[in-house]
Image (cartoon, grey):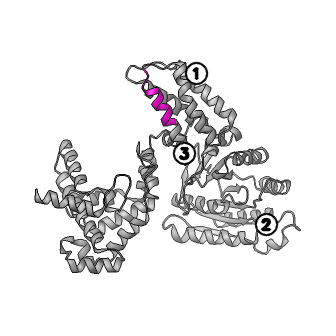
Amino acid sequence: MFERLSEGFSDALRKISGRGTITEANVREALEEVRTALLEADVNLEIVNTFCEEVVADALGAKVTKSLKPGQEFIGVVQNRLIELMSPGGPEGAAPAGVLRISPGPTVVMMCGLQGSGKTTTCGKLAGYLKKQGRTVMLVAADLQRPAAVDQLRTVAEQVEAEMSGGAAVSFYSEPERVAEYGQAVGAAVEVCVNAVKQARAQNIDTVILDTAGRLHINDELMGELQRVNSSLQPHQIYLVVDAMVGQDAVASARAFHDRLNVDGVILTKFDSDTRGGAALTVRKVTGAPIKFIGVGEKLDALEEFHAERIASRILGMGDVVSLVEKAQEEVSEEEAERLQEKMAKGELTMEDFLKQLRTIRKMGPMKQLLGLLPGVGQALKDVAIDDKQLDRVEGIINSMTPTERCDVSLMSNSRRRRIAHGAGVDPMEVGKLVKQFDAVSRMTQQMAGLGAMGKVQAMRKLQAMGGDGAGMTGWKGKGSTSQASSKSRYKKRKRR
């Protein structure tokens, strides 16, 4: 999402890195790149000017640290200012500042936003997020304007309950007959919400999420209905769902909602798109309402808490290792990780284990998105095409193997490879390449288990020279990648030597 911004900050860092000291002249020169990048990202002009002047003041007033170079000093100043720009403020600083305030009885969360912002889907994502925390949730269809809205939310609730295993239950409440009354009975939506909360209290449900009506634009009719729901129920949290792709228009609508409803937080949707990122940088500054969540995909589990310091690190090309670790911890238990480590040390890793790990990684998100969380990798991958469909081919090859073949790849004869290739719809050479690389990785990890630090470095270099790095096994071809034929030729030369 922040590719252009990252390029601008990288260019600014390069300009100042070659200087011996930080001066006002070279800081302002470097900030020209930052200023251009921020404006292209659709950040408010006034905020851009203020941000740049604050960076200049901080950089010139910074205490010089002999252990740091000018470029490092500059990037530290910029990072602090980016965090301050996006953070909710208060004693929590850049932390989410309490995502949901827990209250006696059902905690009522009111979701509002313009039509098309992804509000109904976000209701389902929030329900899934709470479900994983062990909270029971009721989704309430309070959007009586669109007849299909009730059915859509019912479908979302059923998907959350079915697809997100474990955790607490997610239920659904609606009064579909009220749709016909809409426009005639002014308080129809309010009555639906009141009845839902009563039922949730009777069933001891922890959280009630109200999916209210949206419009294509802000008007008095929309705001009047939302204000009636707000005054009748006094919800514990009011979340505004904003489409990040809209840019400064999203910020303007967020300010209008906040002025009328005093929203507690903003949820930015479509954060994984190729949008310019201006809304993420300025919505808190302009509206005063902090960003609480970001939608990072289409699936119902693709909702993350917003951390200003992590987003600032991504913009500056420093990666986000903490988020990557959290994603891994959600998918892999400590016991499973230890079991896999023991098998790798003993050289007992099988294709079945590899398939499980591949599926686990894919649950964490698109491969390019995950690699972008590693420090310095995001910029390197900007022109690299990583096709996740290649992972489908790998899964297809392994699924075409028998259980015996998955446990012992040494059994792989030419006839078996042809049979597997036919079942997976690939060339037999692809099967042979996968088996060869898996065998190399398995043997190398066993050797690395008993080596020291330097030995492991040498082993990794040898592994990469053999084409046994993870990229090759998943079929990733980026810049500088070679074809199967050239890899095979190099392998034969090494064998002759």
Q: Is residue 474 above or below residue 72?
A: below
Tell me the amino acid under the disc marked 2.
Gln
Q: Quadrant of the C terminus?
A: bottom left
CB contact under 8 Å: marks 1 and 2: no
Q: Circle 3 is placed at which residue position?
A: 2
Q: Given this view, does label 1 or label 2 mark the residue nearer the observer?
A: 1
Q: Circle 2 is placed at which residue position?
A: 145
- Which residue is rendered at x = 53% and y = 37% of the image? 8
Tell me the amino acid under the disc marked 3.
Phe
Crowd class of label 2 (few under 14; some 14 to 19; many from 20; radius 10 Å): some
Please name whichever residue, 66 or 41, is drawn nearer the observer in this view of the structure. Answer: 41
Q: Circle 1 is placed at which residue position?
A: 57
Q: Is residue 143 above or below residue 307?
A: below
Q: Position of residue 305 (x, y in %)?
A: 55, 49
Tell me the amino acid under the disc marked 1.
Ala
- Which residue is rendered at x = 70% and y = 67% of the image? 199
Q: Is residue 438 above or below residue 79?
A: below
Picture quarter containing residue 208? bottom right
Main SS category, magenta section: helix
Q: Is residue 47 left or right of residue 179?
A: left
Magenta stretch: give its range. 9-19
- Which residue is rendered at x = 33% and y = 57% of the image? 471
Give the structural element (helix, strand or loop) at label 2: loop
Give the structural element (helix, strand or loop) at label 1: helix
Q: Is residue 28 left or right of residue 412?
A: right
Please name whichever residue, 154 or 356, is drawn nearer the observer in this view of the structure. Answer: 356
On whether residue 308 falls in the magenta region, the answer is no
Is residue 307 at least partly visible in the picture? no
Q: Earlier in the sequence, mark 3 or mark 1?
A: 3
Q: Given this view, does label 3 or label 2 mark the residue nearer the observer?
A: 3
Is residue 188 at least partly visible in the picture? yes
